[in-house]
Image (spheres, coloured by chain):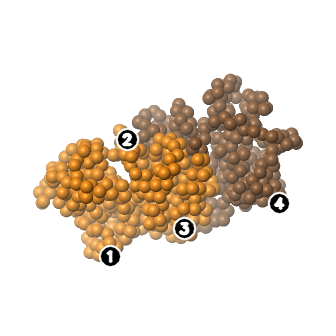
Chain colours: A orange, B brown
Amino acid sequence: MKEFELINRYFKGRGIARRDVNLGIGDDCALVTVPENCQLAITTDTLVAGVHFFDDMPARALGHRVLAVNLSDLAAMGAEPTWVSVALTLPNIDVEWLEEFTEGMHEIAEYFNVQIIGGDTTQGPLSITICAKGTVPEGKALRRSGAKVGDWIYVTGPLGDAGLAIEARKQGIVIPDEHLNYLTTRFYYPTPRVAAGQALRGGASSAIDISDGLLADLGHILSQSQVSAVIHVDKIPVSDALSCSLPRAQQFDYILNYGDDYELLYTVPENNKSMLEMKLRQYGVEVTCIGQIKSGEGQIDILLDGDKFNYRASGFEHFTKELV
Amino acid sequence: MKEFELINRYFKGRGIARRDVNLGIGDDCALVTVPENCQLAITTDTLVAGVHFFDDMPARALGHRVLAVNLSDLAAMGAEPTWVSVALTLPNIDVEWLEEFTEGMHEIAEYFNVQIIGGDTTQGPLSITICAKGTVPEGKALRRSGAKVGDWIYVTGPLGDAGLAIEARKQGIVIPDEHLNYLTTRFYYPTPRVAAGQALRGGASSAIDISDGLLADLGHILSQSQVSAVIHVDKIPVSDALSCSLPRAQQFDYILNYGDDYELLYTVPENNKSMLEMKLRQYGVEVTCIGQIKSGEGQIDILLDGDKFNYRASGFEHFTKELV
């Protein structure tokens, strides 16, 4: 199959057609119109086989996940996702795999009203790079740098699920099927918190998506906002699947250091707290306050059941975006 | 070196800072502002080691070329390049290589006033995907679909040089150093025809960049415009390096079927011919008319010294974007 046929069969004319796309797939560039008084938010993420996912990950899940991790970055800025470019490097043409992969991608794209406007298909080791674009009203984007002393720290959902799905397989941890199915779904089909991100605009002081782990990503907010934080580990939401599968002492690494669930982490000034909690619940967003911003230089104090908790990461290797 | 350090050292704070970039590298997304009454043009191209370039290609050349091939797509739309996202997949951290690679990329970015606004660095087989963005006044973009019967067909420069550089190495063709240096530079450091593309706006009826070869790319214009064409092979500009290195009969494959020089191919209505030729020459663009659009369904008639030329591609394998 030639690139041309591949694009025609799996991309062109499939998925939604947005009115702000003036020219889609099939020319040297796509042409789109950004609404007046909006800024354009742009993000890029690559997933590489064997580095970010197991080689045998179902194609449909991969198609979903690679788009989801990009939309998650837009969500973290409070942007409305609009258009994506897909660069697909494949070792060979596997029609069944491509059908499933693009199905997974089109499903989530349609759900979030996102149009695939172009891309590139090349031959090589399996890897996918997406460049996702979205719009955000001028000056309303959520940045990492806005957290102030006294602001409350929140997350949008349970942490550690995807991490346990990965480690269960790598380490051979035995988990009952019902729980394993849930955990695997959290890894395969993460939900970018797009509605939450938009609802946070005007109320939250900073936001980030948890892709590298709670401590690492909170660290980004702290360093860019030049503040410190205290977090209560026992307040962090944890799924039944995770809490039933591991003794408590073994849960902390997943909760604090695994980021593959793509929940949002955000901070809220005291004055906006009640208003924003109510608004988010109306949007169906889980609202959990897990700590508070303190003065300082990027220090994270961790409390467990009210006492200082000397957490030390066990240092297991997980899928990582870091180059070593 | 962690991803964070790598980005800080080689990307953040280097290169130009455009005023329309509201937030650059370092948050979940970049934020930019598109000027009023402009559309946004978006394109993506991937280069994979061993597929699109030799593994030992100098890093500086690779950094230049991967950005150039993307800017070339913007040029072909008549867009002004503005921002790029860079997804870099590296097998390991080679500081010297990275220094050269990013130097090559920053050089061409600065030349064209383009800002690197973000990206991703991951571990894996060497591959680079760039998503380039540019702006174009509303309704003024050059498309592939606008060629009309009677329009004249032009190219912006000599064809086949990069192809001969590649084949000289693969087939061991002996070429004098002075010529080989020129040919290799054409492959390593292609010049995207950005000024030409913008000068063509309002005058040309269609345009495309020659990435797959003259016949293939002319074919795209013909099929999207629903017309045919006649071209005069003897009018196509050829460099001294190419014409001196090969007997004439062996030149045609390079001229007609190799696209790696990234010249523009465009069509011009009779009424705009003199005006546009003069304008382009003022911009320093080489202006060569090589044929004319005819009625038909995508047929290309090739003439050589006035006679019908039954060209048959020799079918050598070159670097290709096609998946087979």
State which tag comes first along the sequence, 2 or 3.
Answer: 3
Q: Where is residue A50 in the image (x, y as percent from the top left)?
A: 38, 42
- In space, the residues marked 1 and 4 are separated at their CA atoms by 61 Å
Characterize the local packing of mark 3: few (<14), some (14-19) or many (20 or more) Cα atoms within 10 angstroms. some
Which residue has dot 4 on it? Answer: B271
Share a chain, discs 1 and 4?
no
Kind of residue at disc 1: Gln
Q: Position of residue A150 (x, y in %)?
A: 24, 65
Does B149 sit above or below residue A310?
below
Q: Nearer the viewer, mark 2 or mark 3?
A: 3
Residue B103 appears anywhere in the view:
no
User: Helix, strand or loop at disc 2?
Assistant: loop
- In space, the residues marked 4 and 3 are separated at their CA atoms by 36 Å
Mark seen at residue A323: 2
- In space, the residues marked 1 and 2 are separated at their CA atoms by 41 Å
- In space, the residues marked 1 and 3 are separated at their CA atoms by 27 Å
Residue B168, by quadrant, is: top right
- In space, the residues marked 4 and 2 are separated at their CA atoms by 57 Å
- In space, the residues marked 2 and 3 are separated at their CA atoms by 37 Å
Q: Is the C-beta separation of discs 1 and 3 under 8 Å?
A: no
Does A110 sit above or below residue B263?
below
| Chain letter of the residue carrying label 1 | A
